[in-house]
Amino acid sequence: MNAAELILARSMEPAVRVRPAIHFNGGIVTYAELHALVNRTANAFLGLGVLRGDRVPLLLNDSPLYAAAILGLMKIGAVPIPLNTKLRCEEYKFIAADCGAKLLAHDPAFADVLSEVAGVKLLTTKEGRDSLTRRVATASSQAAFAVLEAEDPCFWLYSSGTTGAPKGIIHTQRAAAESSKIMREVLGFDETAVVFCTSKLFFAFALDNALLGVFRIGAATVLNESWADPETVAAQAARIKPDALLTVPTFFRRLLQLDVEKLAPFLDCPYYMTGGERVPDSVAQKWQETTGHELVPCYGMSETFCNSFSNFPGAVRQGSCGRALGGVGTMLLPRGVRPGEGEALGVDEPGVLWLLHPALASRYNSEQKTAESFVEGWFCTNDQFRVDADGYWFHEGRADELLKVAGQWVRPQEVEDAVLGEHVREAACVVVPDADGFERLALYVVADEQGVDLAELEARVRASLPAHSWPKWVRTVGELPRTPTGKVQKYRLKELLQAEISPPPADGPASEGAEGEPPAAADAQGLAPA
């Protein structure tokens, strides 16, 4: 099977070929035009000697050419690897070596950051004699689908870096063919839909819900070369009138900062899906009050490509990730227990989530990491969940951040939930070893425009938390560090606190935090524990 053939099957129907496939830069690319571009791009890569199974990283801004590069490589049996556009040179060097790439296609804006990547042909899209753009323009618009096996690799993703170094995640033709679970199972869309997902295509959520999943049902997607900003998205929503907007909770919060007139287009869009992190109750409530529409949370990860859980319109259980989607198997186990080693946990018993998923990756590009996380078809998410009696799943943080204080379990998410609200718009609680090596909690909060008094916050929240749950350290920051896909980088907060509590020798150089930032933010405040 060739997943690209299945994904493009609807769009090859005569009635769909004339319909819009992509809204981009104020114009429209029809499916007939997309097919021709996919074929020319496939032939351009074949002309470069790309063979079946070859891994081809793509460092491109979102565009019709990017969409065609992904599908063109899939069509000829090669393996596209969409790359995060905000990594550092060292990370691109690591990925190029890790995946064994011989060719890397990139936009000219990334030439400098790729300058030290050796052993790989760097192919730019900039106009020129040997550019990808020129090769595509002069290539044939006819190309055949390669005949492949279900377990052949289709594309790789690299993990988003929330816990450190990225991991190569290998998805098969079988997995890619499962695209569009949200479109088909939750929203019930067909070829008449227009889907607007603000996340970039290297993010699994967008690769499915802004590209492959949308094309599978013959619907239209909206692509932007630049990163989304609220004013641009609002203006596009007014012009294009999408049937669904999909974005991270943080972006919904940013949209709510627009004035009422600019938010008017969102009164007419019927569906709003969100994932990537927990939705604060305050954001969900304000969006409902402002637009008259509910936010519908879902949950997925790069290893499953498609979403695993979702709420459904009209049946949202606030605070949950929703219910398991079709074909998704679930198992909750105590931390450190693997399938077959112990009894599964029951209703309202928190545990580590293991998944069976029709779109599950086959493995990591590492035998050790594969052995740690993949067991007889089951995958360890390393996320802490509980499930209620109605089958709604609640994410309670990373399993590796659960810890005992004074012999009692503490869940960082419980602390985050408790402080959100009055004058606190975001919070992140992380586990950090103290000077004696004991694990303790550190809490970072982002205040609203009025600011927050940390002493008052502690007095208010302590009453609602067990005494042992209050963090040893509390700090304020202007913004939480995030990956380009919007997920909080808790490891950077750990580094920030560790740099603060382990200062360098008085005569030594000052240490630096993540990405060369000072170890403590300029607006950070300390609060000594009682």
Image (cartoon, rainbow, N blue to C red):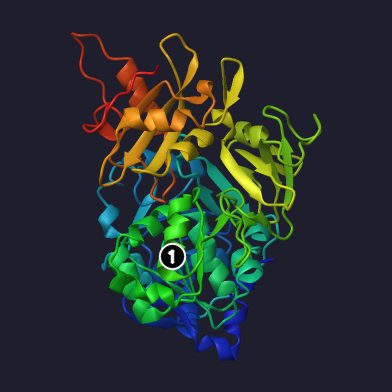
288 with respect to 217 (left or right) = left
Q: In the rendered image, which quarter contains the C terminus?
A: top left
Q: Quadrant of residue 115?
A: top left
Q: Which x, y percent locates residue 176?
A: 62, 61
| Nearer the observer, 108 or 19 | 19
Q: Residue 341 at x, y = what percent? A: 80, 29
- Image height of 405 relative to 383, above or below: above
76 or 320: nearer the viewer: 320
In this rendering, the answer to whether 155 lies above or below 91 is below
Q: Residue at x 50, y 48 (%)?
A: 278
Report the residue marked by disc 1. Answer: 289
Identify the residue shown where x is 69% and y is 66%.
1
**Vertical position of residue 496 compared to residue 216: above or below:** above
Q: Is any atom of residue 139 visible in this view?
A: no
Q: Position of residue 253 (x, y in %)?
A: 38, 56
Residue 395, horizontal then vertical, whole percent: 59, 43
For the residue pair 1 and 195, the one nearer the viewer reads as 195
